[in-house]
Amino acid sequence: MSMEFTVEFYETESGTCPVREFLDDLKSSDPDDFAAVLAGLAKLRNRQYHREPLSKALDDELFELRHVGKLNTRVLWFFMNNRRIIAVHGIRNKGRAIPSRDLATARERMRDWWRRVQS
């Protein structure tokens, strides 16, 4: 019985994948950070990495995977049942705080995903 989680990327109803697009951009702009973030996403399959320093709860539902480089690179995610992790949003910024508009985007995508899963 595997205790691993699966990591999936949120997709919009029209089939675009914002996190994959974010990672594609990162791969061309900063290959080192891209490699670190990809490795971090792979580590999320193990529960021990669901806490700091790699991950941090932002509230009751949203978490961040964080890589600190020249810019802070973050992937925001949430848990679903059956050990699924859904990555919904990626950002890079200089500051420690996540801009409220990015949190709003992540929450909106999370609600959208739940709504479509339950319909």
Image: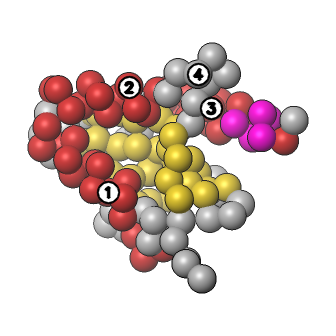
Q: Position of residue 54 (x, y in %)?
A: 33, 62
Q: Which image quadrant: the N terminus?
A: bottom right
**What main secondary structure does the magenta stretch of the protein show?**
helix
Q: Earlier in the sequence, mark 2 or mark 4?
A: 4
Q: CA distance from mark 1 to mark 3?
A: 21 Å
- Extent of the magenta region: 113-117
Q: Which is more N-terminal, label 2 or label 3?
A: 2
- Badge 3 marks a residue whose secondary structure is helix
What is the three-letter code of the residue carrying label 1?
Gly
Q: Quadrant of residue 114?
A: top right
Looking at the rendered structure, which numbered label has been put on residue 40? 1
Front position in the image: 88 or 61: 88
* Residue 82 lies in quadrant: bottom right
Q: Which residue is mark 2?
A: 21
In the picture provided, is 14 more to the left or to the right than 18?
right
Q: Residue at 55% across / 77% down in the picture?
A: 3
Question: How would you rate the neighbour count of disc 4 (Cα within 10 Å): few for under 14, some for 14-19, many for 20 or more?
Answer: few
**Marks 3 and 4, how far apart at CA:** 13 Å
Q: Eyeballing the image, is 8 above or below 11?
A: below
CA gap, disc 2 and disc 1 = 17 Å
Along the polypeptide, which appears first: circle 1 or circle 3? 1
Q: Secondary structure at mark 1?
A: helix
The reply to whether callout 1 and callout 4 are in contact (CB within 8 Å) is no
Q: What mark, if any, has residue 109 been given in the picture?
A: 3
Compare residues 74 and 8 and report the one nearer the observer: 8
Left or right position of 16 against 36:
right
**Are the residues tagged 3 and 2 within 8 Å (C-beta)?**
no
Q: Which residue is located at x 58 percent, y 22 percent?
A: 15
